[in-house]
Amino acid sequence: MLVPLLNARFFNTLFIALFLLSPGFANAQSVTLANGFAHNDYRHRRPLFDAENNGYTHIEADVFLHDNKLVVAHINPYFKKNRTLENLYLAPLFEQVQANNGNVYQGHKDPVTLMIDIKTGAQKTYAALQAVLEKYRSMLSSYDDGIVTTRAVTIVLSGHKPYDAVKAAKNRLVFIDEDLRRVERDTIANVSQMASCKYSKLLKWRGNGMMSMHERQRLLNYVQLAHKNGEQVRLWASPDNKIVWKEILSCGVDLINTDKLATLRDFLVARSAQAK
């Protein structure tokens, strides 16, 4: 009788473990983070799911067009042909949307942003991407003849951006990540939903002492312009420390870019609790 008992315990433990690790469980349990951006998400042990377990609503994947496949990789796509955008992100997101009544996170009706950082030629990569995205049209935010319809997942393109093709399209399933430093002169309505730039291109302050009034005012001006255009502001490659996070959030920056998923989650949850 001992063997059957051990087997029963083993399968019960296995079932519980699988349940706890499932995407549906993660979505049901996570506190969603409006200000968290999972930078290079695909480099985590479980792409997409680790970010979701920590409540991220903005997730980034670098994409290469390789052998007619959209391969997710940081530098070298040649040995990662099965790690496609569809396998790692689009298909799992679609399953979650189907299971959660049209939302990625159960009970969270705001869209999740999937940023696709294009690493290969803009036009050819975008053409391949369009074909794949069409399969998931029902869950994707869209622009159709001047009207933006928000759905469960919003696709934002960065990197080698097909700006002219996106701007000219009357119907599309993507939006553009604009250069924050060009928001005053380049913004076209309904093309861009995010404005980003490298932290060091805008600020030299690393969290030591006080941010200078000059840098603070510069950041505030860019944030104001982007918000006027309906864009979220993101500074990438920013120092991963709480002093910097607190200060740039106070200046109106919308998205904190990080590889430290749990650390930023804890910071944002604590900050939200203090504000109540």
Image: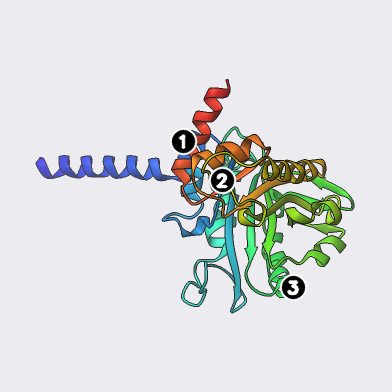
Position of residue 47 measured from the top left corner of the image (x, y, whole percent): 48, 55
Would you name the residue on which mark 2 appears? 96
- Quarter of the image for the N terminus: give it: top left
- Which of labels 3 and 1 is toward the front? 1
Q: Residue 140 vs residue 47: left or right?
A: right
Position of residue 15 measured from the top left corner of the image (x, y, whole percent): 33, 42
Quarter of image, res 255: top right
Task: Please tell me which of labels 3 and 2 falls first in the chain.
Answer: 2
Quote the CA–CA distance across marks 3 and 2. Answer: 30 Å
What crowding class fits label 1: few (fewer than 14 Cα within 10 Å), some (14-19), or many (20 or more)? few
Tell me which amino acid carries mark 2.
Answer: Gln
Labelled disc at residue 50: none
Determine whether label 2 and label 1 are within 8 Å by CB: no
- Quarter of the image for the C terminus: give it: top right
Residue shown at the point (58%, 63%) measured from the top left: 62
Task: Please tell me which of labels 2 and 1 falls first in the chain.
Answer: 2
- Which of labels 2 and 1 is toward the front? 1
Element at label 1: helix
Q: Residue 122 vs residue 3: left or right?
A: right
Element at label 3: helix
Tell me which amino acid carries mark 3.
Answer: Gln
The residue furthest right is 145
Task: Please tell me which of labels 3 and 1 falls first in the chain.
Answer: 3
What crowding class fits label 2: few (fewer than 14 Cα within 10 Å), some (14-19), or many (20 or more)? many
Labelled disc at residue 266: 1
**Visible in this render: residue 30?**
no
**Residue 61, relative to residue 22: is it above or below?**
below
Would you name the residue on which mark 3 appears? 123
Residue shown at the point (16%, 42%) measured from the top left: 6
**Visible in this render: residue 63?**
yes
- Which of labels 3 and 2 is toward the front? 3
Quarter of image, res 7: top left
